[in-house]
Amino acid sequence: MNQTIEVVYEDNVLKPIEPIEGIKEHERVIAYLTDVLL
C-alpha cells in the first residue's frame, strides 16, 4: 500500500494531521519525507 499523508513534526515525533487508514497501532512503516513549501 502506498499513501501520501501530511504530518507535523512536534515534540520529536511525526504526527499525522488526519487518521491513517490501513495502519494499526504500533505497526512499523517506512516513510519518505519531503518538505512542503507553504
Image (cartoon, rainbow, N blue to C red):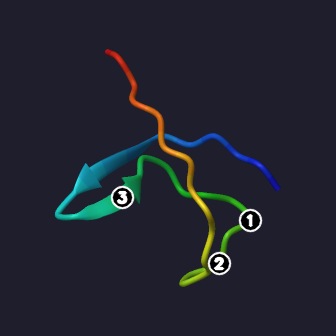
Q: Amino acid at mark 2?
A: Lys
Q: Which residue is mark 2?
A: 24
Residue 2: x and y in percent read 77, 49
| 32 vs 4, nearest the viewer | 32
Query: How many discs appear?
Result: 3
Between tags 3 and 2, which lies in front?
A: 3
Mark 2: which secondary structure? loop
Can you tell which quarter of the image residue 5 is in? top right
Earlier in the chain: of badge 3 and badge 2, it is: 3
What residue type is disc 3 on? Leu
Residue at figure coordinates x 70%, y 46% from the top left: 3
Element marked by disc 1: loop
Residue occupied by mark 3: 14
Residue that label 1 marks: 22
Which residue is pictured at 36% across the width and 58% down the height?
14
> Compared to 22, does 37 lie above or below?
above
Q: Which residue corresponds to the image point at 39% horizontal and 30% vertical from the top-left?
A: 35
